[in-house]
Amino acid sequence: MPTRLDEAALKQLFLDARTLRAWQQRDVPDGVLREVVDLMKMGPTANNSLPARVVFVKSLAAKERLKPHLSPGNVDKTMTAPVTAIVGFDLGFYEHRPAGETPLKGFDDKPDQAQVVAFRNGTLGGAYLMLAARALGLDCGPMSGFDNAGVDREFFAGTKTKSNFICNLGYGDPTGLRPRGGRFTFDEMAKIV
Ligand SMILES: Cc1cc2nc3c(=O)[nH]c(=O)nc-3n(C[C@H](O)[C@H](O)[C@H](O)COP(=O)(O)O)c2cc1C
């Protein structure tokens, strides 16, 4: 039976969690990245479609392949981050199923529908990735300032996967923090009917 998380957990996941743009030079072990995926994949997706795909760019050689596709303002923060996750969505999600699962029907001749499902649920996967990372004590720095087509050519050639956003991961250096941006009140963004 779920119980309410304590205040420290809420702070770590949401209330005190910030978008980081500077990083401690502290390694993120591959095992932690595997844990991130093991958590994110448990989040719900439509029909358990699981379209999110992730490339963890960690080696210097791989970072150099990513670098030319970054917006100028995102280069330093990405090149100094221990890891950059490329979060993508697989347009062939309906045929690439986990072991024991059958292909999802109804998408073969409906690429527009497949695109909607892949993008929506792949984006959810990216959100689960960030919360999983935070739950494991990592900081996140999501970015859409990059050339998607270039990243797709470099990292997803020969596949049906397209990049969505990228996200630096690591242990943040808070000295680089910008002031926290405003948030809506409940009434400005929600209602209970
Ligand atoms: C999908 C997405 C794209 C973003 N793109 C960039 C980016 O290209 N460069 C950047 O410095 N920050 C980028 N951000 C960071 C946001 O500006 C930041 O998360 C937001 O202002 C909230 O900041 P906070 O988490 O510190 O409250 C992006 C965030 C998201 C979720």
Image (spheres, grey):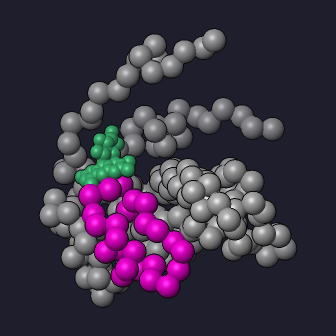
Toward which corner of the image does residue 91 lie, by quadrant? bottom right
Residue in the picture at 25% in, 82% down: 64
The magenta stretch is 142-166
Toward which corner of the image does residue 164 lie, by quadrant? bottom left
100 or 162, nearer to the observer = 162
Residue 156: x percent and y percent?
45, 79
Residue 26 shown left or right of residue 121 in the figure: left
Residue in the picture at 53% in, 32% down: 7
- Note whether residue 21 is visible: yes
143 or 49, nearer to the observer = 49
For this orientation, the residue located farthest to the front is: 109
For this orientation, the residue located farthest to the left is: 72
- Note whether residue 36 is visible: no
Specify whether residue 157 is painted magenta. Answer: yes
Residue in the picture at 49% in, 43% down: 13
Which quadrant of the rendered structure holds the N terminus?
top right
Residue 29, compared with residue 187, is above or below; it is: below
Residue in the picture at 34% in, 66% down: 148
Residue 13 shown left or right of residue 113 in the figure: left
Q: How many marks?
A: 0
Residue 165 shown left or right of residue 93 in the figure: left
Residue 104: x percent and y percent?
77, 64
Residue 166: x percent and y percent?
38, 62
Residue 161, compared with residue 158, is above or below; it is: above
77 or 73, nearer to the observer = 73
Toward which corner of the image does residue 83 lie, by quadrant? bottom left
For this orientation, the residue located farthest to the bottom is: 61
Which quadrant of the rendered structure holds the C terminus?
top right
Specify whether residue 71 is painted magenta. Answer: no
